[in-house]
Amino acid sequence: METRPWQRHYDYDVPTTIRYPRVPAHNLMQASVNAYPDKAALNFYGTETTFWELREQILFMANALGSLGIKKGDRVGVHLPTCPQYVIAYHAILHLGAIVVNLNPMYTAEELKALAQNTGITTLFTFDMVLPNIRSICGEVEIPRVIVTRVTDFINGFDQSTPEEMDLEKGWHHFSLLLKGCSDKRIPKVEIAPEDPALIQFTGGTTGIPKGAVLTHANVVAATIQISQWGGSIAKLTPPERRYVMAVLPYFHVYGTIVVMSWALFNCTTQILVPRFEIDEFMGILEGFKEITFFPAVPTLINAIINHPKAAGMNLDRKLGMLNSGAAPMPLELIDQIEGMGIYYHEGWGMTETTSLGISNPGLGLNKVGSIGIPWPDTDVKLVDVAEGKEEVPKGEPGEIVIKSPLVMQGYWNNPEETAGQMKDGWLYTGDIAVQDEDDYFFIVDRKKDMIIAGGYNVYPREIDEVLYQHPKIKDACSIGVSDEYRGETVKAFIVPNEGESVTEEEVFEFCKEKLAPYKRPKMVEFRKDLPKSAVGKILRKKLREEEEAKKKE
């Protein structure tokens, strides 16, 4: 029996299996440093840092941290937006065998406190704009070392911040002074094994403590090499001197960490660092570059750019080499637009627990609209029955994705119950429901937790969302199940109209009549100015459900 039949769809140069180097994750950038020492590794609002300078700064910081007492296995919080300081801190921590704990700068003081306690961080990298939160946490949780930067310290022409000006507490460290105060750029002598943890990456929880997926050096190495192979047939046609990646995805999120930063450092690519997404400012940045080899994004971001008033005069079809979309499904009209422009794009699927990767449409090969594609090298995927999770379902039937791969995490930090609940015999139970077609391409139906049971029928809200997105007046849409005495649950849609448009509930109902079976149609509609979104622009269905539940309790 053929166990990985989808491999027949791989691009001509994608291997079916890969020999992964048994090296620490931070070693992968060395080839780029040696081959292109004077090429810009980072471009931050026009200020460039070469590969050689970046490596020096990483080693200075690693040795400075070592002299402060940071050692192998220590957890170090990185609480920074996408900026050069993030790249330096992340790699310096790995050089010491310590573990990066990625923290979203938008977390509240309460959330940060819970995560700091959960992971026992001994050191925290943070920045000036969030210091009130950090001061309040440090009053309640002991964090022996705090290292503070100002984001603009790495932009030429800006005044350098000082500890006095930021009013840093006694004993806190200033990022730039720590860097300048160290002249030792020898590689720290620390034994690091592939199975050693590199990263604790929190899954996007909206209540309670999010789970911290432990990703090892082997996971990060496998992910970096797999993504380099997967898109290589297109990316390698651009010579290294001309390779640029648009780094607008946040680096504290696993998608940004792996698909942008790790990929770029391994592939001699200049990272155009964007610490915040403000559409007009972003279009100005995009205008300043002749070509972008690779642009990983999410649908809301792609939509905003492609349909911006400035887009028409920017030759985006010539400028953008390859678009990668993840985190949420791309609306069909958007796919049509991109295909019509002749831009390479592919959609894929991954999770924090799978080091952001796992299943994707090929770069050159058959792309199926609406599909997440096929599993990557060395990856096994099967669909099992949603109720018991034991039997494989026949092709065309919905089942839960279970995956076994070098990409799969070691487990959840400090959480053996959750680890045992989601990992069984080496298989990760993902909670995502998909169908597999006759070509072995996978199509996400929904999240197991999002499924609505209305009048005994299983209703997948994603299917309803896809229909709502086809309405010309609708910009954003998200449907959920709300409790209903008669039907168990009923469908409610949250809708954001396009700017300048107004839509009525009646129009929505009429539109859905032609496209959805009666039990799937929304019975209630709520219009909003915007919908709650995660750091990478994914609509938070869970948050809308929580809001509805809170209303019931009032």
Image (cartoon, rainbow, N blue to C red):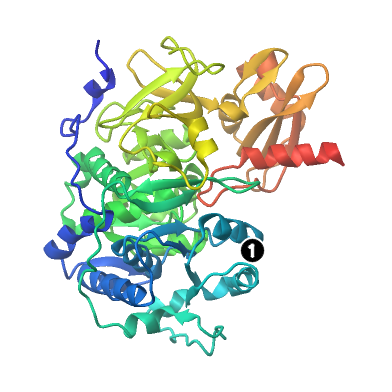
Crowding at dot 1, Cα within 10 Å, few <14 / some 14-19 / many 20+, comes out as some
Q: Position of residue 515 (x, y in %)?
A: 61, 18
Classify 319 as above or below 61. above
**Residue 473 appears in the picture as rendered:** no
Residue lying at the far right in this picture: please name it.
554
Numbered-mark total? 1
Classify 94 as above or below 220. below
Residue behind mark 1: 109
Image side of residue 137 versus residue 286, left or right: right
Residue lying at the far bottom in this picture: please name it.
164
Identify which residue, 91 or 534, lies in the foreground.
91
Mark 1 residue element: helix
Classify 82 as above or below 350. below
Identify which residue, 125 or 357, lies in the foreground.
125
Image side of residue 549 versus residue 221, left or right: right
Identify which residue, 551 or 118, lies in the foreground.
118
Q: Quarter of the image holding residue 152? A: bottom left
Say which residue appears at 70% left-offset and 22% top-offset.
510
Classify 252 as above or below 455. below
Q: Position of residue 416 (x, y in %)?
A: 51, 39
Specify the quadrant that holds the C terminus: top right
Say which residue appears at 43% left-offset and 13% top-offset.
392
Q: Quarter of the image holding residue 177? A: bottom left
Image side of residue 383 versus residue 453, left or right: left
Q: Position of residue 343 (x, y in %)?
A: 32, 41
The amino acid beneath tag 1 is: Ala
Q: Position of residue 144 (x, y in %)?
A: 50, 73
**Residue 210 appears in the picture as rendered:** yes
Image side of residue 526 versus residue 421, left or right: right
Specify the quadrant that holds the N terminus: top left
Say which residue appears at 26% left-offset and 18% top-offset.
5
